[in-house]
Amino acid sequence: MLRRLTSTTLSADPQLAAVRAHCAEHGDALCNAAALIDGDAGKARVLRLMSELRNASRLDRTTRLRLVDLHRLLSLDPVIDALEPDLSTWVLLDPASPEVEQLCLVTDRLYDLLVEIGELDDTRDARALALQVNDAA
C-alpha cells in the first residue's frame, strides 16, 4: 500500500532516524490499525504524520506529540478532547478477532518506539551534562 518512506532531508538526529525506520517497516500496519479504529480520519492521521517525517530535519515536539496521540488512539484511550474521535462512532471490535491481535501488536511496537525515543533523550542529556561538568572543571 505505502511506498518506502523516503526523506527529502538528511538528518543526524537518531530519534528521527528511529521513527523513520519504524514507519518504513510498520507504516502499512499503522495505517490499517488507525483505519480500523477511526476510519479514513485515522488513516489520514498516520499518512499526514509520515509525510511530515519525510521533510523533517529533526524530531520536534509537535511530531512527538502526534506520535503519542497516535498511540493513544491505537490504545483506545478513553480521554476525549476536541481533536479525538467520538467513541460512540467506533466500530465494536471483537477481542478474539485477528484484527484486534494485530492492533495490539502494532500498538506495542509503537510504544516500544516511544520508549526508544525517550532513552535516546536520556542518553543525549547525560552527554550534555558530562560536557558541562568537564567545561566547569
Image (tube, rainbow, N blue to C red):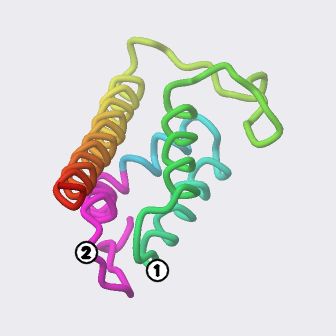
Q: Position of residue 77 (x, y in %)?
A: 59, 22
Please determine whether, in this image, residue 77 is positioned above or below residue 127.
Answer: above
Q: CA distance from mark 1 to mark 2?
A: 14 Å
- Please state the extent of the stretch shown in magenta in the rendering: 1-28
Q: Provide the secondary structure element on which disc 2 rests.
A: loop
User: At 75% across and 27% down in the image, what residue appears?
Assistant: 80
Identify whether 46 is placed above or below 11.
above
| Residue 47 appearing in the image | yes
Sequence-first disc among 1 and 2 = 2
Quadrant location, the C terminus:
bottom left
Residue at (54, 19) in percent of width and height? 93
Q: Position of residue 60 (x, y in %)?
A: 49, 62
Query: What residue type is disc 1 on?
Result: Asn
Question: Residue 61, position in %: x, y?
Answer: 54, 55
Disc number placed over residue 55 in the picture, else none: 1
Q: Is residue 93 magenta?
A: no
Q: Quick one: which residue is furthest to the right in this view?
A: 82
Residue kind at label 2, given as amino acid type? Ala
Q: Which mark is residue 25?
A: none
Residue at screen point 30% across, 58% down: 15
Give the camera-side residue of 65 and 108: 65
- Which mark, residue 12? 2
